[in-house]
Amino acid sequence: MLVLFTDFSLRDPYVGQMQAVLHRLAPGIPLVNLFSDLPDFNPRAAAYLLPAYLEEFPSGTVFVCVVDPGVGSQRLPIMLEADGRWFVAPDNGLLSMVCKRAREVQCWQITWQPPQLSNSFHGRDLFAPVAANLAMGRDVPAEVLPQDALLTAWPEDLLEIIYIDHYGNAITGLRASQLAKTCRIRIGNSICEYVRVFSEAKSGRPFWYENANGMVEIATREASTASLLKLRVGDPISILEHSSRD
């Protein structure tokens, strides 16, 4: 299986162009467009989303991960095998949390280059062909990198909004397993209590819950929390113990 994970959006032709390459070079391999609306130019936010969405994909899946504001620069093209899944991406921290949380990791600098490589679309010209070759079981010329080469100084969990879906729900970079249900979350001037499911929430009152992928998410029943609280990706959150006073 091949999986696209990008900030390209569906309004532009870029996802379609990458899909065309993948279908041409890896015919018959199922292709899933997981994210096409990752926060623009923000590999750090995407890095915390990626590991939360791996569970449904079997061993051998190849992820084509492109959030690449440094395209055309000296940043390395890399591929990573982590717990049986493959990842192809620029070396800008995008794979750092996958690398950090995996049990078994191997990583390589991609040395293969296509006959024609544009300066501005390595997703189509480099990363997609490499991913297709991996999915088809073909060798890709590459040099081994140290296992810690992709790690960053970023924290284990990120106390920020990292993604806002079309409902206006705000996913944070914090795993719910790291937070007691008695805690509250402050975002801006608002305090959010824990609620188990949307149907138990009070209308018009933002709350936090553990979303289906194990992340702390801030939401409002049948309303856009992003509009209600004027949220943007990168907005910080803080954790309040149950005994804290507003």
Image (cartoon, rainbow, N blue to C red):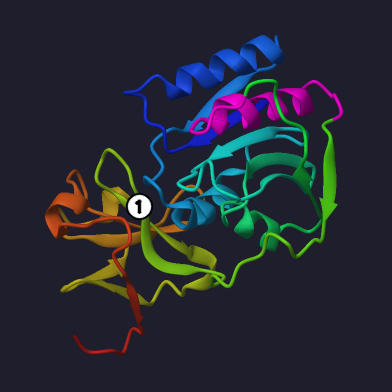
Kindly identify the amino acid type of the residue bearing the numbered disc 1.
Val
Residue 150 place in picture, x, y as percent: 68, 59
Give the magenta part as a residue range: 117-139
Residue 147 place in picture, x, y as percent: 80, 61
Q: Residues within 10 Å of mark 1 (few under 14, many from 20)?
A: few
Residue located 50% across and 17% down the image: 17
Q: Main secondary structure of the magenta part?
A: helix
Q: Nearer the viewer, residue 21 or 217?
A: 21
Q: Which residue is mark 1?
A: 197
Splitting the image into 4 quarters, where does residue 216 fall?
Answer: bottom left
Q: Is residue 61 left or right of residue 16?
A: right
Q: Is residue 132 left or right of residue 147?
A: left
Splitting the image into 4 quarters, where does residue 205 fall?
Answer: bottom left
Q: Nearer the viewer, residue 66 or 231?
A: 66
Residue located 37% across and 65% down the image: 160
Residue 109 forms part of the magenta stretch: no
Q: Nearer the viewer, residue 239 or 95?
A: 95
Residue located 41% across and 32% down the image: 8
- Quarter holding the N terminus is top right
Residue 178 place in picture, x, y as percent: 52, 72
Q: Nearer the viewer, residue 242 or 176?
A: 176
- Asked whether the viewer can see residue 214, the reply is no
Residue 135 forms part of the magenta stretch: yes
Describe the element under mark 1 as helix, strand or loop.
loop
